[in-house]
Image (tube, rainbow, N blue to C red):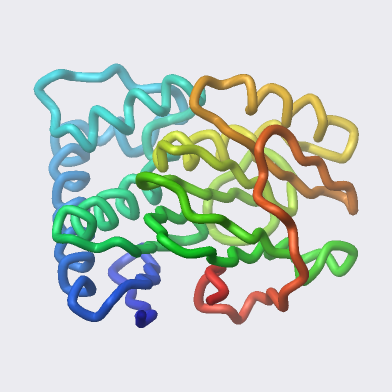
């Protein structure tokens, strides 16, 4: 199993898989980006709206999937874009025979695993440091996606240190992580925000941290102690 990292324009991607599948994943990432660029060229509003975008049956399935998940999460379709790219790459690797494939795209992770893996949670807050999730193998591809109001370049209307969502639908996890982050302004609303996100069909569990407070809701992997810092190339700790 080998980890590689590469960047293309705004995408910073880490791939963990057997060597033979790395080219498959890279090709899939470029394929997904071409699909997205085509849609944005057709309608630039797709890339800028913060509201759900109506699904068009004439669009590519990747675009339609983004639209459906943005509607469920009540966010713009580009809130699902990192998860869409990661999911597309893992799907292609699995189609080629991979039993273990992970793609992390800016903190949004698509996983197909046949053994336990550890996923770090970087909060930037010394009161909650070196915490990770021990993720167990399961059938099918699933997503662990995160948003932050304080870390990274992505737009968030909240002030969370981290908001993480787990779902069997990677794009839904991504969109809901964004929605979750938008809802968490301070420690007083962390519980109500967690309940709201976990009420969305398809969301399995979530975890959030803000102002030294932590909230877990639903089915969240076991938390363990592992070193996690901003210098990690990815949040996947093998």
Residue 157, image quadrant:
top right
Which residue: 65% across, 50% down? 221
The image position of residue 36, as x and y in percent, is 21, 45
Which residue: 14% across, 18% down? 57
The image position of residue 2, as x and y in percent, is 35, 82
In the displayed structure, 73 sits above or below 82; it is above
Q: Is residue 149 visible?
A: no
The image position of residue 83, as x and y in percent, is 39, 48
Report the number of discs: 0
Which residue: 53% across, 76% down? 238
Query: Which quadrant does the N terminus fall into?
Result: bottom left
Which residue: 25% across, 36% down? 44
In the displayed structure, 64 sits above or below 221; it is above
In the displayed structure, 168 sits above or below 25; it is above
Q: Is residue 204 visible?
A: yes
- Compare residues 117 and 73 and report the one nearer the observer: 117
Residue 228, image quadrant:
bottom right
The image position of residue 136, as x and y in percent, is 55, 55
Tell which residue pokes out farthest to the left in this image: 58
In the displayed structure, 231 sits above or below 47; it is below
Q: Is residue 126 left or right of residue 111?
A: right
């Amino acid at each position: 199993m080998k980890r590689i990292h590469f960047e293309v324009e705004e995408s910073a991607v880490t791939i963990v898989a057997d060597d033979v599948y790395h080219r498959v994943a890279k090709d899939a990432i470029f394929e997904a980006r071409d699909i997205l660029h085509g849609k944005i060229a057709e309608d630039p509003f797709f890339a800028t709206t913060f509201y759900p975008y109506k699904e068009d049956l004439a669009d590519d399935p990747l675009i339609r999937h983004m639209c459906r998940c943005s509607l469920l999460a009540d966010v713009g379709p580009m809130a699902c874009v990192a998860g869409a790219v990661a999911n597309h790459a893992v799907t292609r690797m699995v189609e080629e025979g991979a039993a273990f494939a992970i793609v992390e795209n800016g903190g949004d992770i698509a996983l197909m695993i046949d053994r336990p893996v550890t996923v770090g949670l970087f909060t930037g807050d010394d009161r909650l440091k070196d915490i990770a999730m021990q993720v167990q193998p399961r059938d099918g591809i699933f997503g662990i996606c995160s948003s932050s109001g304080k870390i990274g370049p992505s737009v968030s209307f909240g002030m969370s240190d981290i908001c993480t969502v787990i779902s069997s639908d990677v794009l839904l996890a991504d969109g809901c992580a964004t929605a979750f982050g938008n809802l968490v302004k301070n420690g007083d609303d962390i519980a109500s925000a967690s309940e709201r996100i976990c009420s969305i069909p398809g969301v399995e569990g979530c975890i959030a941290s803000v102002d030294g407070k932590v909230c877990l809701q639903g089915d969240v992997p076991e938390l363990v102690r592992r070193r996690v810092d901003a210098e990690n190339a990815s949040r996947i700790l093998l």
